[in-house]
Each structure stands twice: as C-alpha cells, then as structure tokens.
C-alpha cells in the first residue's frame, strides 16, 4: 500500500469500524468528527502545498495541528469552545492512530497531549416570561405554519428539549392521557420522561390531528412545508424568524443573540425560580452531571446579587436604580457519510 493510501485507509476505518461499530457513537457525533477531519485535512493540504490525495502519515505532526487550531480561531473566527471541540475530535483520531500505526506513535502522542484552551465561562442567557409570551403571542395561528410554530415553541419551552431532541420526537413518544408526558431520547440514546402541561398536550394533539398522524406512532411530529421532518437548521430558522418579528413589539428581544438553545436555558431558569429542586431540573433537562445544572444556580445568585447592589442601603442617600471540490479522495468520502 502506498503511503498516500495509508492515511485514506486509516480515516475510513476510523469512521466505519471504530467510531460507529466499536464505540457506537451517535450519527450526530460522527458527523461532528467528520466535519473536523474535513477541515483539518483540507488545511493540512494547503499548509504543506500538497493535494489531499498526496497526504500520508509522515505529514501528521503536532505543529500542523497547532497551526490548524490557530487557523480556525483566527481565520474562521471560531470561539474557544469550538476550538476545543475540534481538538477533542482530533485527539480521538490520533489515539486511534497510535494503535494502528505504531511507527508514528511518538508524533501522535504529542498531538494527543495538546491541552485544551481555557475559555471564559459564558454567561447563561435566557428569556423572561414576558419575552417568551411576546414571541408566542406574535404568531398568527390562523395559518397552518403558525399553528406548527406555536406548538413547536410551546413544546420546547415546556420540556427544555434540545433542538435535535425536538426534531426526533414521534407521535408515539407523547402520552395524551392519563399521564400527560413525553419520552425524550437524548444524548447517547438515553431517554427521560418529561411532564407536559395540558395546554401543550392540546396543541400537540390538534397539530397531529391536523396532519392526520394521530394514529401513526412512528411518524415524526414536526415537519417542514414539504412534509419532511424538521432539521436543527429548520428550527433555528423558525426561531430566528419568530424572534425577529416579536422584537418589533418587544424591545427586550432586540439586538440579542438568541438561539433555540436559549429556550432550554429559559426552562431551567424558570423552573429554578419557581422553587423546583436541582435534581428534578437535572432529570428534566437530561443533564448527565449535576454540575451542569448548577450553572443555573450560579447565574440566579448573580442576578440576585446585582439586584441587591442596585438598591441603596436603608437610611442611605441612594435610590433604586432602573433595570432597564476538486479533491476526489478522502474529503469526498467524508462528505458522503
């Protein structure tokens, strides 16, 4: 086998045999690894002045990986979190390569040892109840697309589901009676049961009846105008459009970077502020670690601290403040995954 063919062989085996068959990773995780590999190999070819077809194990060095990480931060404007996710995927690949290609194991181990970059802890963004209401109230439910969007956004707010989890919801996952709940399949294929408000159930029931799928347990609930299951990008578009429209009448929504994932944070914060126990919120959102859920406590405490500091001490002089493809090679193969 030519040296240039060895890399292509290892990459294909990594995805087909290791990630999918041996590790059993979800398709979404595999796709994320694929995107990282495409970016890295394309960068490496350009950095070395080679075609991707000419790359071989001899070209895989720690300095080029470091250059790639710097490139995606500087040229692609990737944040530290994204940079670390790309590094994590490359570490997994080079750990695999260490076992498959002992001749180059020393250079692979140096790549695996690259540390993750420290990132500032982001402030959790969420919506106030009035802002959620503004988005929902602005939807024209006389139109079929409006009824779908209203049901979808209400479902996200009720459950705190991840976007992909909402895409995957099927008719059979929803219990309409007597226990109003939905079974959500999250990361790693783990399932959780989340209670539904009667209003959410009615919205879902009406929407499923309108589509004629109420007796089709395996059918996806939320679909696009062509009748195809909604994708993450589809839900992002819906949310972006609805939020932009609502911001015309709700100034608090203007100029903010708001994604569907913010609804998940919103659900958690509103549960916490309503006195719901942290362990219940952890189960509700499907967090693996309680430390993830604890982040909402920290932001809630910080909000209360700021509120307190905005008030003048009793007897003080202050006053309350106002809150206002030419490479037909491994790249092409990765595209086909």
Image (cartoon, helix red, strand yellow):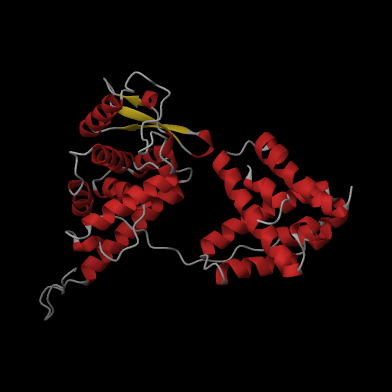
Residue lying furthest bottom in this view?
317
Q: Position of residue 1 (x, y in %)?
A: 89, 47
Instruction: Using the image, determine if residue 272 lies above or below residue 181.
Output: below
> Along the line of sight, which residue is nearer the eye, 235 or 188?
235
**Visible residue check, residue 63:** no
Q: Position of residue 63 (x, y in %)?
A: 73, 69
Instruction: Using the image, determine if residue 200 lies above or below residue 82.
Output: above
Instruction: Give the total of numbered labels.
Output: 0
Q: Quadrant of the C terminus?
A: top right
What residue do we see at 63% from left, 47% from top? 335
Lateral position of residue 211 relative to residue 289, left or right: left
**Visible residue check, residue 147:** yes
> Along the line of sight, which residue is nearer the eye, 234 or 84?
234
What residue do we see at 74% from left, 65% from top? 62
Lateral position of residue 247 relative to residue 72, left or right: left
Which of the 4 quarters of the picture holds residue 317?
A: bottom left
Residue lying furthest front in this view?
326
> Along the line of sight, which residue is nearer the eye, 187 or 239?
239
Lateral position of residue 17 relative to residue 134, left or right: right
Instruction: Using the image, determine if residue 82 lies above or below residue 154.
Output: below
Q: Position of residue 232 (x, y in %)?
A: 43, 45
Q: Position of residue 4 (x, y in %)?
A: 83, 54
What residue do we see at 25% from left, 36% from top? 144
């Amino acid at each position: 086998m030519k040296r240039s063919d060895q890399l292509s062989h290892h990459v294909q085996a990594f995805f087909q045999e290791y990630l999918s068959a041996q590790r059993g990773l979800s398709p979404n995780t595999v796709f994320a690894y694929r995107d990282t590999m495409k970016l890295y190999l394309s960068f490496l070819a350009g950095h070395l002045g080679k075609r991707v077809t000419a790359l071989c194990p001899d070209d895989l060095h720690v300095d080029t990986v470091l250059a790639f990480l710097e490139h995606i931060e500087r040229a692609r404007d990737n944040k530290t979190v994204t940079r670390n996710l790309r590094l994590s995927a490359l570490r997994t690949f080079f750990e695999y390569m260490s076992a498959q290609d002992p001749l180059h194991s020393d250079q692979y181990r140096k790549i695996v040892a690259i540390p993750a970059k420290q990132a500032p802890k982001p402030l959790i963004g969420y919506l106030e109840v009035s802002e959620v209401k503004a988005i929902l109230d602005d939807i024209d439910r006389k139109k079929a697309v409006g009824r779908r969007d209203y049901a979808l956004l209400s479902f996200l707010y009720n459950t705190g589901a991840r976007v992909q989890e909402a895409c995957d919801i099927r008719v059979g996952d929803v219990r309409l009676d007597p226990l109003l709940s939905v079974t959500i399949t999250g990361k790693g294929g783990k399932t959780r049961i989340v209670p539904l408000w009667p209003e959410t159930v009615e919205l879902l029931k009406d929407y499923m009846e309108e589509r004629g799928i109420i007796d089709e347990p395996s059918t996806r609930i939320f679909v696009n105008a062509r009748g195809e299951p909604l994708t993450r990008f589809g839900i992002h578009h819906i949310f972006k459009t609805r939020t932009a429209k609502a911001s015309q009448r709700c100034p608090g929504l203007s100029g903010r970077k708001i994604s569907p994932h913010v609804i998940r944070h919103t659900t958690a914060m509103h549960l916490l502020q309503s006195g719901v126990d942290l362990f219940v919120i952890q189960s509700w959102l499907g967090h693996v670690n309680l430390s993830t859920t604890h982040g909402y406590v920290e932001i809630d405490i910080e909000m209360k601290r700021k509120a307190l500091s905005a008030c003048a001490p009793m007897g003080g002089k202050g006053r309350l403040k106002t809150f206002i493809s030419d490479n037909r090679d491994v790249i092409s193969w990765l595209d086909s995954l």
